[in-house]
Image (cartoon, grey):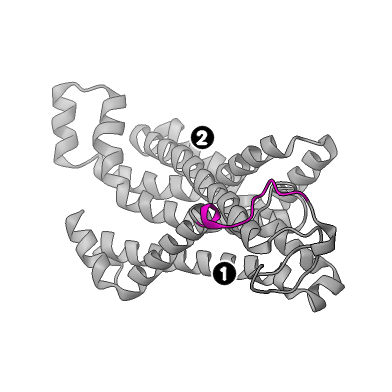
């Protein structure tokens, strides 16, 4: 791991992506503390749709709320959706991939066919249909966020499961596993104490990229009004202001800042993920 970190530090693009990502987290999670405004402030229609100024650096929205504060708080939602969706993907994908590769036979066949079925289903249309169903059911926005996180993560596990399975199939034939067999260790200990830890590099890289995918998927759903819904802000539902031609042409400060945040965050995560892949797997270097 130390060697990987050393290789990571040599990659200037990856380090730049990491620095930008850290700054984005500080902006979203620490920034609101220093804002003179609060999300609990009453709506002030007289202050609505004000252009960027000294008092409001990114202007105000249609009900007079500070856009910069909302961008920061929306970033908390979008980043948390990406992170939780990634954790769901890693938990399901790594576990099923390890079980499939270790037991092989009919267990492997069942899990891999299930993965094939899920991979054959286009994720975005499924999420749009489920989002529309949730809208009809009028689910509480606070609970809806968690369901969106789980759905995004659940639909993303098959690719990780396949990668982990391939590694497990190779590792289970190594000498250390033969020693574990001789010692009579339980299957659970072999899988979770000896095999899975050796797949951590792949899990880290896929997990990193899964965060970016989760943020993008949430943004698309929220833009369509099917993901995170007001009053909970997210970058996606803030960009939905661009649905109105008046807002799109006359008030770009309502949708450009969250769009720029999505772009910067996703690009930074992808660059950092590529750097992690190169650092953790030297054979992937070209």
- The single residue placed furthest to the bottom in the displayed view is 249
Could you tell me how far apart the alpha carbons at marks 1 and 2 are, in whole angstroms? 38 Å
Q: Which mark is residue 68?
A: none
Q: Which residue is mark 1?
A: 263
Q: 109 or 117, which is in the foreground? A: 117
Q: Position of residue 192 (x, y in %)?
A: 30, 32
The image quadrant that residue 100 belongs to is top left
Q: Residues within 10 Å of mark 1 (few under 14, many from 20)?
A: few
- Give the answer, above or below, for where 278 lies relative to 156: below
| Residue drawn where x is 79% and y is 63% of the image | 47
| Residue drawn where x is 55% and y is 54% of the image | 32
Q: 105 or 241, which is in the foreground? A: 241
Q: Start and end of the magenta stretch?
A: 31-42
Q: Provide the major secondary structure of the magenta segment.
A: loop
Q: Position of residue 43 (x, y in %)?
A: 79, 52
Per the image, is 36 magenta? yes
Q: Residues within 10 Å of mark 2 (few under 14, many from 20)?
A: few
Residue 268 as seen in the image, left or right of residue 215: left
| Residue drawn where x is 31% and y is 52% of the image | 201
- Give the answer, above or below, for where 35 lies relative to 183: below
Dot 2 falls on a residue whose secondary structure is helix
Q: Which residue is mark 2?
A: 110
Q: Is residue 82 visible?
A: yes
The image quadrant that residue 168 belongs to is top left
* Callouts 1 and 2 close, C-beta under 8 Å: no
């Amino acid at each position: 791991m130390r060697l990987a970190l050393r290789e990571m530090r040599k990659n200037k693009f990856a380090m730049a992506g990491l620095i930008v990502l850290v700054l984005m987290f500080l902006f979203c999670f620490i920034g609101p503390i220093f804002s003179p405004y609060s999300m609990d402030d009453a709506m002030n229609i007289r202050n609505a749709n004000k252009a960027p100024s000294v008092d409001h650096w990114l202007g105000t929205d249609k009900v007079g709320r500070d856009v910069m504060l909302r961008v920061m708080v929306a970033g908390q939602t979008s980043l948390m959706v990406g992170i939780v969706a990634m954790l769901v993907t890693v938990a399901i994908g790594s576990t099923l991939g390890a079980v499939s590769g270790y037991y092989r036979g009919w267990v492997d066949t069942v899990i891999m066919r299930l993965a094939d079925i899920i991979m054959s289903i286009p994720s975005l249309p499924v999420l749009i249909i489920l989002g529309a169903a949730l809208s009809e059911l009028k689910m509480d926005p606070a609970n809806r966020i968690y369901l969106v996180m789980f759905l995004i993560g659940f639909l993303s596990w098959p690719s990780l499961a396949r990668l982990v399975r391939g590694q497990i199939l190779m590792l289970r034939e190594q000498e250390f596993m033969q020693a574990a067999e001789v010692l009579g260790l339980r299957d659970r200990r072999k899988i979770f104490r000896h095999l899975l830890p050796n797949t951590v590099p792949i899990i880290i890289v896929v997990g990193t990229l899964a965060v970016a995918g989760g943020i993008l998927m949430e943004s698309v759903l929220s833009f369509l009004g099917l993901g995170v819904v007001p009053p909970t802000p997210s970058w996606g539902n803030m960009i939905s202001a661009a649905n109105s031609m008046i807002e799109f042409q006359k008030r770009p400060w309502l949708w450009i800042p969250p769009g720029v945040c999505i772009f910067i965050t996703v690009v930074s995560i992808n660059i950092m993920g590529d750097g992690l892949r190169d650092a953790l797997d030297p054979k992937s270097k070209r």
